[in-house]
Image (cartoon, helix red, strand yellow):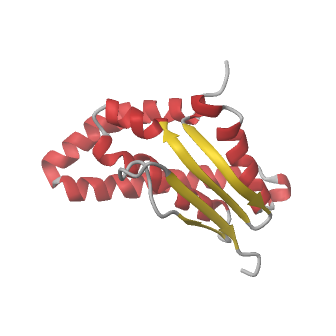
């Protein structure tokens, strides 16, 4: 049996999350439901990053290792992994790319979860990077989930930290 892609995992998670989110909204209101869900998704991203960091050679994380995760997860699988992206540049101190199509956001919208696509997907990115290696930060000016034509990912690595 092959391993699930990220988008397949996120679809399964979203199917479980949808009724929970609806119940939370009814009981606590939309803002509190989003906040609770955001905290849970953040914890999940941190756990995934910690597992990825533990698999790093010699448990030594780096920008190159982070870039390799991105390439294995998204570039190697193309659109079937959930993203269509243009890598602008990559090096030992950065990874810059734009997502030109996000199948995650499309999927969440089709599932009736478009209002929390940012919570379910976008919020993971910076958290994952920081939990993988605290020297990696994400600067993203816009996302497709917010209505922009593309997501601008600018990961930087601060070796002095």
From this view, report whether residue 96 is shown above or below residue 135: above
70 left or right, relative to 6: right
Residue 30 vs residue 114, the one in the foreground: 114
Q: Quadrant of residue 6?
A: top right
Furthest-bottom residue in this view: 160
Residue 147 vs residue 15, the one in the foreground: 147
From this view, report whether residue 43 is shown above or below residue 78: below
Q: Quadrant of residue 72?
A: top right
- The structure residue drawn at horizontal position 27% and vertical position 40%, both measured from the top left corner, is 20
Rendered-image quadrant of the N terminus: top right
- The structure residue drawn at horizontal position 30% and vertical position 59%, both measured from the top left corner, is 35
38 left or right, relative to 1: left
Residue 159 rendering spot, x and y as whole percentages: 76, 76
- The structure residue drawn at horizontal position 39% and vertical position 51%, both measured from the top left corner, is 118
Furthest-right residue in this view: 58
Residue 86 vs residue 31, the one in the foreground: 86
From this view, report whether residue 116 is shown above or below residue 3: below
Residue 12 rendering spot, x and y as whole percentages: 44, 30
Residue 142 rendering spot, x and y as whole percentages: 45, 59
Rendered-image quadrant of the C terminus: bottom right
Residue 32 rendering spot, x and y as whole percentages: 23, 58
User: How many numbered marks have been drawn onto this rendered protein structure?
Assistant: 0
- The reply to whether residue 54 is in sight is no
- The reply to whether residue 14 is in sight is yes
């Amino acid at each position: 049996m092959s391993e699930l892609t990220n988008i397949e995992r996120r679809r399964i998670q979203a199917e479980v999350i949808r009724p929970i989110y609806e119940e939370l909204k009814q009981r606590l209101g939309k803002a509190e439901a989003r906040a609770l869900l955001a905290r849970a998704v953040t914890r999940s991203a941190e756990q995934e990053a910690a597992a990825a960091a533990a698999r790093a050679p010699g448990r030594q994380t780096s920008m190159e290792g982070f870039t390799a995760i991105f390439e294995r997860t998204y570039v190697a699988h193309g659109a079937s992994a959930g993203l269509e992206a243009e890598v602008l540049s990559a090096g030992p101190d950065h990874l810059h790319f734009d997502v030109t199509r996000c199948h995650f956001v499309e999927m969440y919208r089709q599932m009736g979860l478009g209002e929390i696509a940012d919570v379910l997907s976008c919020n993971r990115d910076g958290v994952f990077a920081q939990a993988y290696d605290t020297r990696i930060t994400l600067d993203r000016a816009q996302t497709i989930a917010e209505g922009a034509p593309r997501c601008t990912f600018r990961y930087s690595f601060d070796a002095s930290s």
